[in-house]
Image (tube, helix red, strand yellow):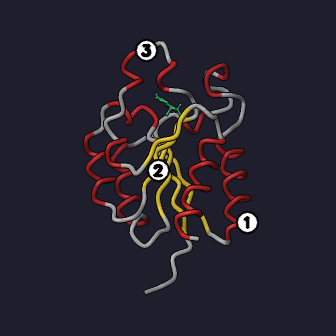
Amino acid sequence: MPPKHRLVVANGPNLDILGTREPDIYGRQTLADIQAMVDAKAEEYGWTVSFFQSNHEGELIDRLHKEGPDSIGVIINPAALTHYSIALYDCLRALDVPVVEVHLSNLFARTEEYRSRSVTAPAALGFICGFGSRSYILAMEYLNAVYE
Ligand code: DQA
């Protein structure tokens, strides 16, 4: 079996427009900025990273089917899919690697009540939200601790 060293970081709909999208909620960092932070941390850990974003549920699921197995783990910000995608929940459940769900904003402090419900989180090992791009880094620290 090949040594596991690849982290998968998946990002859902509308995260491609971070930076300009509701910056008072999501901050001014772009997804490329977040990717750079993730890459820097991954280098520290000696990992490679498959970092991707899609606005399409099925495309995300296809990538996770392909790249999730044999990875160190999956960090996913499902974005709006968090709140309704049973298909993504099923996909995450089927993965036999640790999954950490992350969000930039604190879902429990948002004005829309539906945001405080995640249908995908029960398929994850854990859930980190509210720390902006740091949510991703905290998830990486967890996965590193698991494999140390
Ligand atoms: C988000 C929160 C979701 O409710 C929202 O639909 C997003 C971003 C976050 O990272 O805070 O697109 O996942």
Instruction: Measure the C-alpha gap from mark 1 to mark 3.
Output: 38 Å
Pointer 1 residue: 44
Whichever of labels 2 and 1 marks the residue nearer the N terminus, that label is: 1
Q: Is the CB of mark 3 within 8 Å of ligand 1?
A: yes
- Tell me the element at label 3: loop
- Tell me the element at label 2: strand
Q: Position of residue 96 (x, y in %)?
A: 34, 65
Who's the residue at 45% across and 40% down the image? 55
Q: Position of residue 4 (x, y in %)?
A: 51, 76
Instruction: Measure the C-alpha gap from mark 2 to mark 3.
Output: 23 Å
Pointer 2 residue: 100
- Mark 2 is surrounded, within 10 Å at the Cα level, by few (under 14), some (14 to 19) or many (20 or more) other residues, namely many
Please state which amino acid type lies under the numbered disc 1.
Glu
- Mark 3 is surrounded, within 10 Å at the Cα level, by few (under 14), some (14 to 19) or many (20 or more) other residues, namely few
User: In the picture shown, does residue 105 fall above or below 86?
Assistant: above
Q: Is residue 123 left or right of residue 40?
A: left
Which image quadrant: the N terminus?
A: bottom left
Pointer 3 residue: 112
Please state which amino acid type lies under the numbered disc 2.
Val
Q: Nearer the viewer, mark 1 or mark 3?
A: 1
Between 126 and 12, the one lying in front of the other is: 126
User: In the picture shown, does residue 91 fall above or below 17?
Assistant: below
Q: Which mark is residue 124?
A: none
Who's the residue at 47% across and 48% down the image? 76
Between 41 and 23, the one lying in front of the other is: 41
Instruction: Measure the C-alpha gap from mark 2 to mark 1.
Output: 20 Å
Whichever of labels 1 and 3 marks the residue nearer the N terminus, that label is: 1
Which image quadrant: the C terminus?
A: bottom right
